[in-house]
Image (cartoon, rainbow, N blue to C red):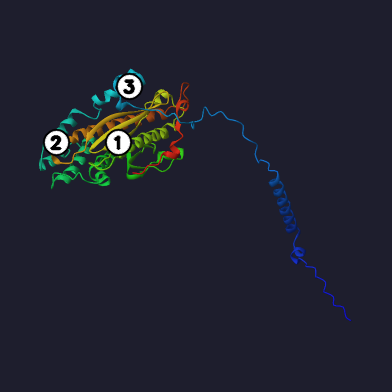
Amino acid sequence: PSICRSPRPKKRVNYAEIDSSDEERESRKIRRTNNTTDLESAESPVPRTPPQAPRDLTTTPNKYSEDISIICAFDKSVAELTLEIGAELANKLYSVRNTNPQIWTPDLEKYIDNVLKKSGKQFKNAALVDVPDDLFRLYCEKVLLDFYNLVDINPNMDRKIGKHKYITYQISSIYKFYEKTFLNLDFDWIESHARSARIINSEIVRIDSIATRHYDGLDVWHMEVAGGPCNATDTYTLGDTKKTLRMDVLKLIAILRNHLDCNVELATKIKVFCTQVIGTRMTLYALGMLPDGRFISSELATAVVPFSFHGRSQFKAVFRMMAIFHDELTKQEELMGEIDRIVLRSKGTTVRHVLKIPRNYSSEFMYLS
């Protein structure tokens, strides 16, 4: 009987390997070696770089601290404030309310009084400026004529409106004409993104309006409006107040971080500003830093937004508030120029030694308008 034998398995030949060049064989050898090395390193991992030695962080500008202190000077008496910051600074803060800015001249006040006494078309004609070189008077003319165009048919404006219409009709003209007259700020409106919040990787912050200074491209002012003119709630107002203070601190930190070697005595003169609108009342605030690193917020001026032609005299307080705003901005630009001209590091206490950045802002600082 015949024996059936299974055929021998043929040996497979890798012709590609036979035909491969010496360079390709060497490349495959290197890859096999690397794979073996990776397996060995997985079994006993070895750090690629040695651990870093401890560093002294006392001289860095990124000292995160929880104990951020903000003194609200506007809710304290002179005696209480004196205990906090000393008599000299306390009296200086309170004197702002009783002192007119340099731009508030007798001629300017006479012009405003004369216009506000007029009615009808006489009001419009009296508002026209005959002194073109007086920029602040020109600014007043623009605001008054815009107001007249809102009340020339119906002398009363509706108060039962929403927040965005309130900003667009009554508030924006006060600032947009300032922007186009003095050309020192760039305003952005309604749910603007606050760029200063990015310095500590916080969430995007939306605010009602923000102003960026042309001089250095930094945010120096912002505004929060607590709802419409007649429907502001206590909860909304409280939330806006907290948001405003935190935003002020962020704006100031963004500026101070550019001047870490500046002497503290000079740095305490740096300010940022905000306007808070509650109902029909607008209040201008300033925030600065004390020599010990604490922050202090103070009220500069307040005014009521008029909603009828009969209430046009309220514009005098509005213009005085804007005159203070302009005067403060002018002083800040002069101060920043003085600081930029200092090329040697101060031998005394500098911003680097006292500046604190709040840690919890990066996770909590997210508010929507």
Identify the residue shown where x is 46% and y is 40%: 201
> Marks 3 and 1: CB-CB under 8 Å?
no
Image quadrant holding the N terminus, namely bottom right
Identify the residue shown where x is 71% and y is 54%: 31
Q: Is residue 155 above or below residue 355?
A: below
Residue 183 visible from this viewpoint: no
- What amino acid is labelled 3 in the image? Leu
Left or right of 25? Residue 76 is: left
| Callout 2: SS | helix
Residue placed under numbered mark 2 in the picture:
116
Please name whichever residue, 232 or 342, is drawn nearer the observer in this view of the structure. Answer: 232
- What amino acid is labelled 1 in the image? Thr
Foreground label between 3 and 1: 3
Please name whichever residue, 152 or 369, is drawn nearer the observer in this view of the structure. Answer: 369
Foreground label between 2 and 3: 3
Identify the residue shown where x is 29% and y is 37%: 234
Q: Dot 3 surroundings within 10 Å: few (below 14), some, or many (20 or more)?
A: many
Query: Residue lying farthest front?
Result: 1
Q: Which numbered disc, 3 or 1, marks the residue that appears first in the sequence?
A: 3
Q: In which quarter of the image is residue 250?
A: top left
- What amino acid is labelled 2 in the image? Leu
Q: Quadrant of residue 187?
A: top left
Q: In which quarter of the image is residue 235?
A: top left
Residue placed under numbered mark 3 in the picture:
81
Query: Residue lying farthest right?
Result: 1
Left or right of 38? Residue 202 is: left
* Residue 237 spot, x, y in % from top left: 30, 37
Please name whichever residue, 18 or 279, is drawn nearer the observer in this view of the structure. Answer: 279
Marker disc for residue 275: 1
Label 2 – label 3 distance at C-alpha: 38 Å
* Residue 183 spot, x, y in % from top left: 30, 39
> Marks 2 and 3: CB-CB under 8 Å?
no
